[in-house]
Amino acid sequence: MALPRARKLLVDVHTHLYLESYMALLRARTSVPKVVSTPDKGDRLVILDDEPSGGRPIGPEYYSREEKLRFMDRHGIDISVVSLANPWLHFLSPSEAVSAAKTLNDDIETYCSSGPPKRLYAFGVLPLAPDVPIPALLSSIAHLASLPKVKGLILGSRGLGKGLDDPALDVVWEKIAEAGLMVFLHPHYGLGSGAAEAWGEQENGHVLPLALGFPFETTIAITRLILSGVFDRHPTLKIMLAHSGGALPQLSSRLASCVAHDPLVASRLKHDPRYYLALLYLDAVSYGPEELEFVSKVIGRGASYATGAQSKAHTDGTERIMWGTDHPFFPPIAGEKDQKWMSVTENLEAVRNVARWTEEQREGVRGANAVRILGLDVD
């Protein structure tokens, strides 16, 4: 059987890249998002308005497969499930988005299939941009499902412009669930237009948008999706939340109380909102053992909140958590070429130091869960 071997694997499910075709698209642009090149600063990635320091410095680690594999080898990572980094395709016209998604999904399949056997898999993309017709999205889902190395798709929180709870997307969730694809819900927009006021006037660089804005965006997006009843209509839909679920685990009981006091929302759901957390998957990009232990407990208690549940016993929440690095973001602070990345070492230490996890649970989070959930070929 593959599973005993898989337990010893280290699998990274949160690792990004900008494919060469995507880099070419960004280099050709004059408005955000774009890549700008200057003689003194080199290539800079500008994906948000008012980026500090004129954008993020980028090099081959953002797009080179050789650099990705070098990073994996340096840190003992056996398998990476790569995904296109934000901002994806929302800024394109409908026809451009549809065409770009087809190209990018074919390119990411080639990126994986032409590399070392069984080391690279991927989450593809959908042409999610305003006014993209639903049939084009359904065609893209079918295309993704036909690609052997593609195990799901990554998307942001805006959908076609109205959020992921847009009723027009319900057939999209249905087809994704039928295809058995994993949805990797990842932030990009933060708090949107209200961010400037929320962050204040003091210069804090990227800290507040990344540390708070990103997780809050994920929290709001998945909560809206839960409250829309999508998991009642499509209970087999698989969604993995970036950054260990944002703030939703911490706020889930408060959410349940608010729903209970709002008859309109309560009547829409078949279960207590805490139940739906047991249907979600999380990455383990939390950087701390206490946080990991907490979110695993919140996931594990979810089934006990099903309507009519006869038992309050908890299941093993660790079975729905998968390790990740967020590479190539957050590089070594000192900038030394061969230095270990904190995003790797701290997230591995977090798994290792959860006080009440068994070694089998740790091995599951490090790799066996991803092999089982995503159907990775490790034989």
Image (cartoon, helix red, strand yellow):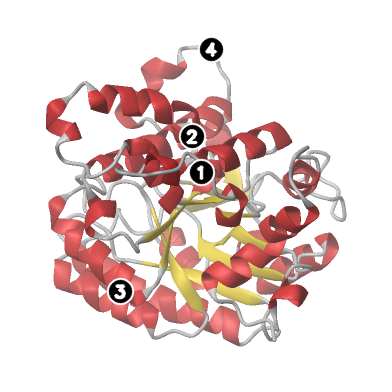
Looking at the image, residue 94 sits to the left or right of residue 212; the answer is: left
Write down the residue under mark 2: 249
**Secondary structure of residue under mark 2:** helix
Pointer 1: what residue? Answer: 299
Q: Position of residue 58 (x, y in %)?
A: 63, 53
Q: Which one is closest to the eye, mark 1 or mark 4?
A: 1
Identity of the residue drawn at 79% across and 68% down? 8
Q: Nearer the viewer, mark 4 or mark 3?
A: 3
Q: Which residue is mark 3?
A: 178
Rounded to the nearest angstrom, the CA distance separating label 3 from label 1 is: 24 Å
Which residue in the protein does label 4 denote?
A: 202
Q: Quick check: can you spot residue 60?
A: no
Q: Are marks 1 and 2 in contact (CB under 8 Å)?
A: yes
- The three-letter code of the residue at mark 4 reads Gln
State the CA–CA distance, disc 4 to disc 2: 30 Å
Task: Give the distance between the C-alpha atoms of the residues marked 1 and 4, in whole angstroms.
Answer: 37 Å
Q: Is residue 43 left or right of residue 156?
A: right
User: What is the quadrant of residue 163 in the picture?
Assistant: top left
Which mark's residue is nearer the viewer, 3 or 1? 1
Q: Earlier in the sequence, mark 2 or mark 3?
A: 3
Instruction: Quote the CA–CA distance across marks 4 and 3.
Output: 48 Å
Instruction: Mark 4 vs mark 2: give the one in front.
Output: 2
What kind of residue is marked 2? Answer: Pro
Image quarter in which the C terminus is found: bottom right
Helix, strand or loop for disc 1:
helix
Q: Earlier in the sequence, mark 4 or mark 3?
A: 3
Q: Are marks 1 and 4 in contact (CB under 8 Å)?
A: no
Give the mark nearest the N terminus, 4 or 2: 4
Q: Is residue 41 above or below residue 131?
A: above
The numbered mark, 1 or 2, whose residue comes first in the sequence reads 2
